[in-house]
Amino acid sequence: MNDPLIERLADAVRDTGHPVTDTDRAELAAFLPLTREYAGTSGIVFDDTRALALAVHALAFVRRVRTAEHLDALDDQLAAETAPGRMDAVRTLIDTYCAPHGFHAHRTEVLLLALHFETAAQIAQQSTPQA
Amino acid sequence: MTVKIVIGHRLGKGQAVADGVRAAGGEPVLIPGPGADMKVGDVMAAEGAVLGISFCGSGGAGAVTAKAKYGHDIEFGMRSAQAGVTAVEQGRTVLGFGFLDSEELGFKVTEALLKKLAKEAS
């Protein structure tokens, strides 16, 4: 069965120079469930906008894993903006995906994905009525 | 004619790009604060801007969001000023880059846009 989020992503980037391929679909189908599992256990809800942003990030990530590409390092102080334990949990998530590919993701990948979760968590918190 | 170009950077940067836009004759609208890349489409609509440039780790979130919300013609995942120039020449209205806060990028993209607009007007 097709993943509706992958289909939304494919539709959004169809007319670009980097449309979603069958290989992308297969890899996203392996990676996105890991992100959903973590979001579920952490109580993080992605709205439609944040889900699409996560999906396009995931697309770029699985492509980088495929080509063994590493991003430049980011200011590590950004990690301090994530919830306690988030970086470790996202490291586990990323390693789970990368291990069968024989790829070790640098800390930048962990930080960027952790920031997606952090933003979604903060938006959800802001939109929740306070008691 | 004022040509507004909206710039949004995930980490709240983008000043160098804005300087490049201004140097080339455009009017930069730099969205302040972290997460600004996700607001590019909204600010373009509010400002009547002709082009948006978003920056994030993978170079896609802001552009794809602008496409989903406003139907912009986008390119994403770019890593060089030249890729941005090509995208402008192809008629893209929102450009998604990885982290690349350089004056050269702002200048070259604006130069290409002004050239394209002048050609269309003649």
Image (tube, grey):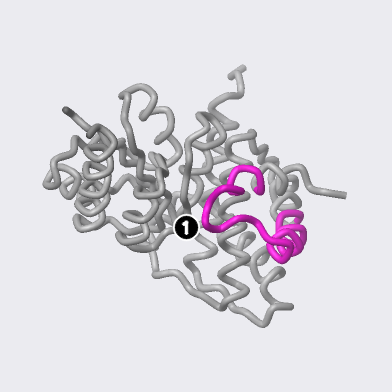
Q: In the image, what residue occupies the spot 70% across and 68% down?
A: A97
Q: In the image, what residue occupies the spot 60% across and 63% down?
A: A88
Q: Which residue is mark 1?
A: B77
Q: In the image, what residue occupies the spot 57% across and 31% down?
A: A125
| The quarter of the displayed image where residue A22 is located | bottom right
Q: Which residues are magenta?
A: A10-33
User: Considering only vertical position in the picture, is B122 above or below A104?
Assistant: above
Amino acid at the residue labelled 1: Gly
Where does residue A4 sit, x and y in percent of width and height? 76, 42
Q: Secondary structure at mark 1?
A: strand
Where does residue A26 sit, x and y in percent of width and height? 76, 63
Q: Nearer the viewer, residue A54 or A12?
A: A12
Give the left or right position of residue A46, taking residue B96 as reference.
Answer: right
Q: In the image, what residue occupies the spot 68% across and 62% down?
A: A24
Q: Is residue A54 visible?
A: no
Q: Nearer the viewer, residue B48 or A79?
A: B48
